[in-house]
Image (cartoon, rainbow, N blue to C red):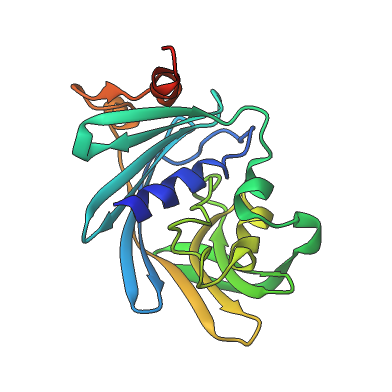
Amino acid sequence: MKKSSSFLLACALLIPTALPAASFEGKVRFKITSGKTAQDMDYSVKNGLARIDVQSKDGTASVIMDPAKQEVTILIPEQKMYMVQSIAGKDGAAAAAGVDPANTSFEKTGATEKILGYICTKYIAKNKDSSTEIWATEDLGTFMGTGPGGGSPFGGGKRGGAGAQAWEAALVGKNFFPLRVVSQNSSGKEITRMEATAVEKKSIPDSEFAPPDGFQKFDMGAMMRGMMPGR
């Protein structure tokens, strides 16, 4: 669960500070493959809010993103707790991806393909470490990111490094929503693949974008202060 939690915490940093009006309410299911590891990810959207749930053999990790308040809520089901973290004043895309967007090219190609009923345009993001093929639609609103570093399926650590996430720094905040993303390293070897397996337009209860009843708020600052001598 630590790996999934690190992934979701990193994804919080990718939230743009301003988003266009949401044009989609519902859930997109993704399959994310990195090497021999595969995970399912649900991406839910409503009224400018987003929730990401990552399923793995260790359980489910979840994060709720609120760009208007510039904060994220990380759910910790095992302890029935949650944490709220402010991202105000942070350059989310650049900080999270660990790359300089100025060194990342982002090219729109003329290729299109229908994926799950949505017309997607092919984009190519490149930097010195990676090349990423992105098939994105303009019909599902703005993508808030999936998150690099730590436990991200899109690299960080040993697999892909920051270069594998350059596409996110180029994409986040624009009015595109990717339904297929394939990243390759500088040698042309596929690093990761994220592909939508279902898009469901539906009404989602407001309760999905708030901590569940009975969850306690975890205050890291208070805990650290309590550990200081003389406290």
Taking the image as drawn, is residue 28 in sight? no
Residue closer to the observer: 31 or 11: 11
Q: Farthest residue to the top: give it.
A: 231
Compared with 203, 161 (above or below) is below
Camera-side residue of 20 and 158: 158
Q: Residue at x 23, y 27 (%)?
A: 212
> Could you say where residue 104 lies in the image, as x and y percent from the top left?
75, 63
Q: Residue at x 63, y 87 (%)?
A: 187
Camera-nearest residue between 184 and 199: 184
* Residue at the limit of the structure toward the right, as seen here: 102
Residue drawn at x 48%, y 29% is 85
Could you tell whether 80 is left or right of 121 in the image? left
Question: Within the image, what quadrant is residue 82 found in?
Answer: top left
Residue 21, image x, y percentages? 57, 33
Residue 186 visible in the current orientation = yes
Residue 31 in percent (x, y) is at 35, 65
Q: Is residue 82 left or right of residue 20?
A: left
Residue 167 against residue 138 in the figure, above or below: below
Q: Quadrant of the C terminus?
A: top left
Residue 52 occupies quadrant: top left
**How many numbered circles are shown?**
0
Residue closest to the eye, 226 or 104: 226
Q: Position of residue 34 (x, y in %)?
A: 41, 73
Say above or below: 59 vs 106. Answer: above
Would you identify the image quadrant in which residue 142 lies? top right
